[in-house]
Amino acid sequence: MPDAVPLLGFATPLFHTGRNTSVRRGQRWHGVPRACIEYAPGQLSAPLELRTELRRFDTLDAADLADEHDPACRTPPGLLAVMQQLYPGFEQDETVTLVHFQWPASG
């Protein structure tokens, strides 16, 4: 039996056409090959291919965040504020996973 495709959840499901990036605390999403997205209540995307990379948060710059799905997170200070809201105790020296995917989902 194949593994279930995980659900990549979003507090702010805003996406733009083309490559989108989501930054996640820790390594949980690193190496995950695909996921579905709930883009509206009860509506899931087809499985999306993911590309992931591990980084230290304090090494990210605006160029790394240019494709962030949420406009509020396209600068390091903006992303930090959101990360600290979503992940209590989040610190700038933590490892994060950048999750890249294409939107809209195809298939």
Image: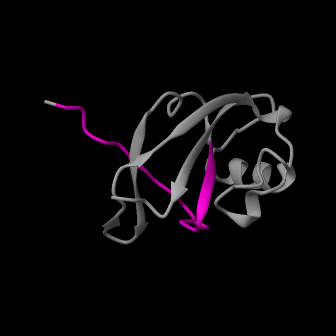
Residue drawn where x is 81% and y is 57% of the image: 78
Residue situated furthest front in the rendering: 107
Residue drawn where x is 46% and y is 53% of the image: 9
- Residue 106 pos. (x, y %): 39, 59
Span shown in magenta: 2-23
Colour scheme in the image? one colour
Q: Main secondary structure of the magenta part?
A: loop
Residue situated furthest left in the rendering: 1
**The C terminus lies in quadrant:** bottom left
Count of picture labels: 0
The answer to which of 71 and 80 lies nearer the viewer is: 71
**54 displayed left or right of 50:** right
91, above or below 42, in the image: above
**2 displayed left or right of 97:** left
Residue drawn where x is 76% and y is 52% of the image: 79
Q: Is residue 97 magenta?
A: no
Indicate the quadrant where residue 97 lies: top right
**The N terminus lies in quadrant:** top left
Residue drawn where x is 85% and y is 50% of the image: 62
- Residue 48 pos. (x, y %): 42, 49
Q: Is residue 17 magenta?
A: yes
Indicate the quadrant where residue 94 lies: top right
The answer to which of 16 and 76 lies nearer the viewer is: 16
- Residue 55 pos. (x, y %): 72, 29
